[in-house]
Amino acid sequence: MAALLALTVWAVEAQGYKPGDVATDFKLKNVDGKTVSLADYKSAKGFIVIFTCNTCPYAVAYEDRIIALDKKYAPLGYPVIAINPNDPGASTADTYALMQKKAKDKQFTFPYLVDEGQKIYPQYGATKTPHVYVLQKDKKNLVVRYIGAIDNNYKDANDVDEKYVEAAVDALLGGKTIAMATTAAIGCSIKVKK
Amino acid sequence: MSRISIALLLLIAPLVVAQTEWKREIIKFDQFEKLVDQQDDVLYVINFWATWCGPCVKELPDFMAVNEAMKDRKDFKMILVSLDEKSNWQSEVIPFAANNNLNVDIYLLDELRRMNYWIPRVDKKWMGSIPATVFYKNGKKLRFVEKQLHKDALETIIKEVSAL
């Protein structure tokens, strides 16, 4: 019975967050060597948490748009927090040194964190890169408000007609309901330690 | 055989080899839906992949081995659905298929801007990571798997869904 219960709990957890769920905070190492926690951002209204990586073609295609999201929404209270969920052993392109290089080369304006031990992405339920979670501060809680893609055209930023993340954050800033709280898009599977 | 006809054969042979009996087509999602909605008692194993996707490329030899073993079965058909960019179809996907002996029908799903439409229609739980493999029979989805499959695991699923 206990085993069955444990199995059920695991199955529920394995599904990750849905909109409305309370998200966990974390303490993860940034590319500058410092540790970052969402609790550090006292004045933030929420966060655009993006699981992304160094070389997935979809993640690379979105780099400039992720920087643009941070530049637009950090001053409005929704900074971008990027987390690399890939195990550097399973994905040699995602070592800490190469993450530092990526952040420097692309002049990331936001933290680019290592999910050391791969403990955070499974709690969120991220399955791929890039995979976005928009969180809203509600008293002491971080409530998941949006899960999914950045927009509807990874290939061509000029040919996008649905900006999912912007629409979600705009709705939160305007006190409105998010029209599309989850979206699906193709991405690279997260590389798990063998 | 005359020297001329031998020379002619040598000339034609590579062309014949380059031809494939397998389908190579760019399709839209409504065509995909028709493809898997066949009332013919055939088990369709549909694998979503891309040439840039490491785990997809890794599992393909296992998929090909299983397909080779099942090739005489009339009630089994494996199909690869590439999610590569349409512009890479001729330059990357087709040569990749030839170089890796992908002896199955291969389609490229040309639905870049409608992912949020078609991905949930393939499976509600699918957030879009690949590889992903779907098993259909008589238009009914029997199983959806969103991870890399090894030969044993693929064979086990085929056995399980065949028994349904």
Image (cartoon, rainbow, N blue to C red):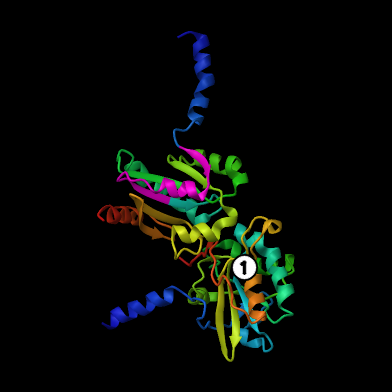
**Which quarter of the figure has residue A175?**
bottom right
Disc 1 is placed on an element classified as helix
Left or right: B57 as drawn, with respect to B43: right
Q: Is residue B92 above or below residue A17?
A: above
Task: Judge whether residue B29 is colored magenta.
Answer: yes
Left or right: A103 as drawn, with respect to B38: right
- Which one is nearer the viewer's eye here, B120 or B75? B120
Residue B116 in view of the camera: yes
Left or right: A95 as drawn, with respect to B9: right
Amino acid on which disc 1 is placed: Tyr
- Which residue is found at the position 74% from the left and 69% from the top? A107
- Which one is nearer the viewer's eye here, A63 or B32? B32
Q: What chain does badge 1 belong to?
A: A
Please state the extent of the stretch shown in magenta in the rendering: B23-46
Judged from this view, the residue extending furthest toward the bottom is A139
- Which residue is found at the position 55% from the left and 79% from the top? A144
Q: Is residue A87 above or below residue B138?
A: below
**Which quarter of the figure has residue A149?**
bottom right
Task: Judge whether residue A189 is colored magenta.
Answer: no
Residue A11, position as x, y percentages in the image: 38, 74
- Which one is nearer the viewer's eye here, A116 or B124? B124
- Which residue is found at the position 55% from the left and 75% from the top? A116
Residue A97, position as x, y percentages in the image: 65, 68
Quickly name the residue at label 1: A164
Residue A81, position as x, y percentages in the image: 64, 76
Image quarter where the C terminus of chain B lies is bottom left
Residue B133, position as x, y percentages in the image: 42, 55
Residue B151 in view of the camera: no
In this figure, what is the number of numbered marks?
1
